[in-house]
Amino acid sequence: MDFSVLFEPANLQLYAEGLFTTLWLLLAAVSAGLLLSIPAAVWRVSRQRWLAWPVAAYTYVVRGTPMLLQLYLIYYGLAQFDVVRDSAAWGALSSAGFCAALALTLNTVAYTTEMLAGALRATAPGEIEAAHSVGMSRMQMLRRIVLPSALRRSLPAYGNEVIMMLHATSLASTVTLLDLTAAADRLYANYYLPFEPFIAAALVYIALTFGLTRLFKAAERRWLAHLQARG
Amino acid sequence: MLAGAWLSLQVALAALAIAMALGVVGAMARLAPQPALRASAEAYATLVRGVPELVLMLLVFYGGQGLVGGALEALGLPPVEIDQFMAGVFTLGFIYGAYLSETFRGALLGVPPGQWEAGLAYGMGRGRVFWRLILPQAARLALPGLTNNWLVLLKATALVSVIGLQDMMYLAKQAGSATREPFTYLLWAGAGYLALTSASLLALRLLSRRVSVGVRHGEI
């Protein structure tokens, strides 16, 4: 094993660029995903069939197919249609970075929506009755009572989802993006070192995973303090 | 396409067999009294689950060749060609073994310790208690987690297309670029995966009904 070659300035820079791509993909997908998931989850648990059903169908299809396939559909697949190629959106859709961020977002929306919907369903009936009895509208009740507690309760599961997303960003390397995985792959090809570049990338991913775990533990201590055992 | 779907299923099932074996061993090691066993099983579970599947797949596919080749040479055995099928199956099995060891550990912990004591009190050996009493009860508890792990594994088989194995994903991409209709072919592959995951969900629901015979569910 010879890791020294990885520490040459040019190669370190390659890893740094890859890390940057990985992180912005993660941040873009997770933030856009969370924003879209909140209304989607409210629709998912809605008693109106025409609101709940499309969301349920969406999460079923997305969660039943591989993320890699979704990415290929967007990046390679959409180019099949002249309508898409001629449209104003083609500028964005022909860029690998946008496609990867879009695919990751659409994917995380499906999982996060189901997770939040589960938390919403678990709201104690008494809280909803109390909100009704003081004359809150549906929006007021959602904003002040139901969503704050549901979002808190889904925090542990959401931490896992973000880590899954971090790992999913590695798929971006298959559509020509230079992320952490692609950086390792390029070093493998340049030096024909099969182990070292991937082990180095794996260590960075592990460090990021641990970082995220700690971040979410801290968030749980802050927002779920009322549920923790008192020492 | 059907051939590709069959190959995807084969990869998934073969990887599942390896993952189940590794998962059971890993879970037992996690609960073993020997600290060294516990630590190594914990390291396996934590490290593997911290790295993306694709990175491990590339690591094992590129690195594994040389490693196995070198080991065989040192033993004076003839070299073996590792094909993509074996590499894909072993990598997926290795990765999901780590996830399953967590699932199984939780299930084993869920069996009340009184079951051990009862078995030992009847004069059964430890091995027999484990096989006849603990494992069947833990299987029931592990099934929901196992269902999730299986669905993730089934979808993760799409990654073997990256190392060149001709699964459903790979064939869809090839056929798509040959006919210049990538969307159509990828959509069919998507339907194929959806059919596989839906069928698995149904089958596992039936299985869970079967292993839960005699379990009382509280009325909510």
Image (cartoon, helix red, strand yellow):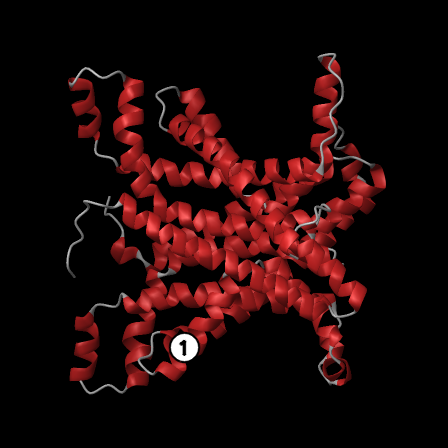
Locate residue A146: give its quadrant. Answer: bottom left
**Camera sees residue B95:** no
- Which residue appears at 27% of the width and 38% of the height? B110
- Report the residue marked by disc 1: A53
Height in image: A148 above or below B25?
below
**Could you classify mark 1 by the number of other residues whose Cα lies within 10 Å: few (under 14), some (14-19), or many (20 or more)?**
some
Q: Nearer the viewer, residue A58 or A93?
A: A58
Q: Quadrant of the N terminus of chain A?
A: top right
* Residue B78 drawn above or below residue B67: above
Residue B82, x across and y down, in percent: 71, 32
Among all residues in the image, which is located at the extreme front? Answer: B2
Residue B111 seen anywhere in this rendered image of the structure: yes
- Give coordinates of residue A93: x percent, y percent: 71, 74
**A207 in relation to A164, above or below:** above
Helix, strand or loop at disc 1? helix
Q: Position of residue A35 (x, y in %)?
A: 48, 73
Q: Percent x, y for residue A141?
A: 28, 80
Name of the residue lying farthest toward the top: B76
Whether residue B146 sits left or right of residue A133 in the image: it is: right
- Amino acid, disc 1: Trp
> Total marks drawn?
1
Residue in the foreground of this view, choosing between B97 and A219: B97
Residue at the spot 32% in from the left edge and 48% down from the top edge: B208
Q: Residue at x 84, y 38 (%)?
A: A191
The residue drawn where x is 30% and y is 42% is B141
